[in-house]
């Protein structure tokens, strides 16, 4: 998912350090040159059984995956881009500057006039305002529009955005209804805007419902003519569903032009098939499945790196009243959520399933990579693995065993956990959870689903699911697509990603407090209060180990590591090159 630190020089409010990018194991590099060379094709393996399925750069809730954002960044430029050091990188942003008033309620964005669409037209303030209007409409709650934006609830979208206006051709003024912490708003608000050309996409200028319906109709049709006009480093040349997506350089790109002739996103059916392709050289950039780490020595012409992205891993509980068999009412009880968390053997997973890779995590941001955003008090787990304690908590709360299942008021702690297929380590992890929960009288039925299916579950289809796990083994979890880890869109009332319907006035207040202006120390303490409450109250989330990415590249392809951005798990193939 999206989707993380010294603080940006311009904003200068919250200081954090990004470290622990991971070790690398290398084989001798076969290269005859240290100077980037032109030409060649990079074949990039996608996570098993996953594929891009939403190409409009404002992503819908049902398609809110890291892969879709990676795809978008191939073709479109963000208004504001944060690099791996949590600094605004104005060389890779449409904005040349962002300033704000003393209260943090008015933000002025100046666009760099160097940026153009691939048809030669300049990227303008009017494009930004048009895109914002789409974003706002798709973020409004309780509408019958064709799709809901994944940005709903993030960066105050849409509730605190009073107006967004164009001043001339290259200036945009954003006015908020309330003063806000500028570090939070720029990271979580302005980063949500990835402009599209108004001249191409303004198909229904007077009817927003028709406009959003049109976008929905072409969102997964990247060969449609609307995608011919882009401002990113690549254009999509062709696609074959469940096979490959072929990108070629955008000749009119105004940034760092691609060394490569072509980049192919390659669909993978399983980690073992991907491993075979890496071994034979059919792929030159990809992932290594955790279950195959013991075989990495067979990749004699490849290098492995293990960076952590800023994020956390969890599975989601459906707390809606219409969840199957009344299980939503059960999940609303803190005692049930505590028992579920106490049944998670995080250390055992890391040691025996994930080959020692990973870190124990019990809140909304993992302790790796090292960052001041993480509350150091949470190095001590509030609910360390202890099924015996979990069972006792249930019994104290009035649950009792009936035919081997904890039962209360005719509701059984028996439910289905849908989990993402394609990862053996992910399957092993949910099997372990099932076994440990059984010790507490919690009976779980496991159903594997394609990744794109699992991430589409929401409150809108709450009758279809009880609990979902996006997966372990480099597939699951939440990566922050912006580097300020507050939880409005995740666990606040009305957040697009709050698919389980969790609602706590205390949590809402703690989240709102993280948005307020204040000193650096005040802002950190507010984040820590939110994280501590999440760790103890388990907001529809049961926390799982956080794993590093296991990134592999062939030794003759360069730049994959140096250009990789763990903030949002962003790749930049226009900086890759292949030595002859």
Image (cartoon, grey):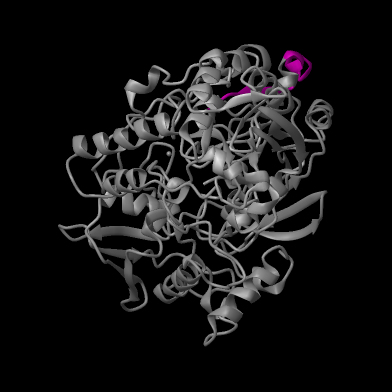
Extreme-left residue of the structure: 102
Judge whether 112 appears above or below 383 on screen.
Answer: below
Judge whether 237 appears above or below 528 on screen.
Answer: below
**Front position in the image: 313 or 327:** 327
Task: Inspect the magenta stretch and tell me whether residue 298 lies in it.
Answer: yes
Determine which quarter of the picture holds residue 112: bottom left
Place of residue 98 in the rendered image (x, y in percent of width and height, measured from the top left): 29, 58
Judge whether 433 appears above or below 111 on screen.
Answer: above
Task: Name the side, left or right, on which 295 lies relative to 359.
Answer: right
Place of residue 93 in the rendered image (x, y in percent of width and height, measured from the top left): 42, 55
Task: Name the side, left or right, on which 249 lies relative to 41.
Answer: left
Determine which quarter of the picture holds residue 238: bottom right
Report whether residue 364 is seen. Answer: yes
Q: Residue at x 26, y 48 (%)?
A: 11
Task: Inspect the magenta stretch and tell me whether residue 332 lies in it.
Answer: no
What's the magenta region? Answer: 294-307
Extreme-bottom residue of the structure: 206
Q: Residue at x 31, y 58 (%)?
A: 97
Judge whether 379 appears above or below 540 on screen.
Answer: above
In the rendered image, which quarter contains the C terminus? top right
């Amino acid at each position: 998912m999206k989707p993380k630190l010294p603080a940006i020089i311009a904003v200068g409010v919250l200081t954090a350090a990004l470290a622990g990018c991971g070790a690398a194991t290398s084989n001798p590099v076969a290269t005859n040159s240290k100077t980037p060379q032109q030409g060649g094709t990079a074949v990039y393996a996608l996570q098993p059984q996953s594929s891009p399925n939403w190409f409009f750069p404002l992503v819908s809730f049902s398609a809110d995956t890291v892969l879709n954002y990676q795809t978008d960044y191939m073709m479109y430029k963000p208004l504001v881009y944060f690099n791996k050091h949590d600094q605004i990188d104005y060389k890779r942003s449409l904005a040349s500057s962002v300033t704000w008033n003393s209260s943090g309620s008015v933000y002025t964005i100046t666009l760099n006039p160097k940026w153009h669409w691939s048809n030669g037209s300049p990227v303008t303030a009017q494009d930004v305002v048009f895109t914002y209007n789409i974003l706002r409409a798709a973020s409004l709650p309780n509408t019958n529009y064709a799709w809901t934006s994944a940005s709903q609830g993030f960066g105050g979208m849409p509730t605190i955005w009073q107006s967004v206006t164009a001043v001339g051709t290259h200036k945009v003024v954003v006015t908020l209804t309330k003063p806000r912490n500028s570090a939070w708003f720029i990271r979580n608000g302005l980063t949500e805007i990835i402009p599209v050309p108004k001249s191409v996409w303004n198909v229904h200028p007077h009817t927003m419902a028709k406009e959003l319906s049109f976008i929905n109709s072409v969102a997964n049709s990247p060969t449609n003519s609307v995608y011919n006009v882009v401002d990113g480093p690549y254009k999509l040349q062709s696609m074959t569903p469940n096979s490959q997506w072929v990108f070629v350089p955008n000749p009119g790109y105004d940034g760092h032009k691609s060394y490569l002739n072509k980049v192919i996103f390659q669909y993978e059916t399983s980690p073992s098939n991907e491993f075979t392709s890496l071994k034979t050289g059919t792929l030159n950039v990809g992932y290594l499945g955790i279950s195959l780490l013991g075989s990495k020595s067979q990749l004699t012409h490849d290098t492995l790196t293990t960076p952590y992205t800023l994020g956390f891993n969890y599975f989601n509980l459906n707390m809606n009243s219409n969840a199957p068999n009344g299980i939503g009412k059960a999940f609303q009880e803190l005692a049930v959520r505590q028992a579920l968390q106490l049944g998670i053997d995080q250390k055992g997973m890391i040691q025996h399933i994930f080959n020692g890779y990973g870190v124990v995590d019990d809140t909304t941001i993992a302790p790796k990579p090292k960052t001041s955003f993480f509350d150091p008090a949470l190095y001590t787990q509030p609910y360390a693995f202890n099924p015996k304690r979990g069972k006792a908590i249930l019994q104290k709360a009035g649950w009792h065993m009936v035919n081997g299942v904890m039962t209360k008021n005719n509701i059984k702690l028996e439910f289905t956990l849908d989990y993402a297929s394609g990862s053996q380590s992910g399957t092993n992890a949910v099997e372990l959870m099932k076994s440990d929960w059984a010790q507490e009288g919690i009976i779980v039925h496991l159903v594997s689903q394609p990744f794109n299916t699992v991430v589409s579950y929401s409150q809108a289809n709450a009758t279809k699911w009880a609990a979902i796990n996006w997966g372990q083994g480099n597939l699951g979890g939440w990566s922050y697509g912006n580097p300020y880890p507050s939880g409005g869109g995740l666990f606040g009332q009305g957040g697009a990603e709050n698919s389980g319907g969790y609602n706590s006035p205390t949590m809402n207040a703690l989240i709102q407090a993280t948005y307020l202006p204040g000193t650096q120390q005040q802002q950190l303490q507010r984040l820590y209060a939110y994280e501590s409450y999440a760790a103890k109250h388990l907001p529809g989330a049961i926390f799982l180990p956080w794993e590093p990415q296991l990134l592999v590249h062939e030794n003759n392809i360069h730049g994959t590591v140096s250009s990789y951005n763990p903030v949002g798990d962003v790749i930049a193939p226009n900086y890759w090159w292949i030595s002859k």
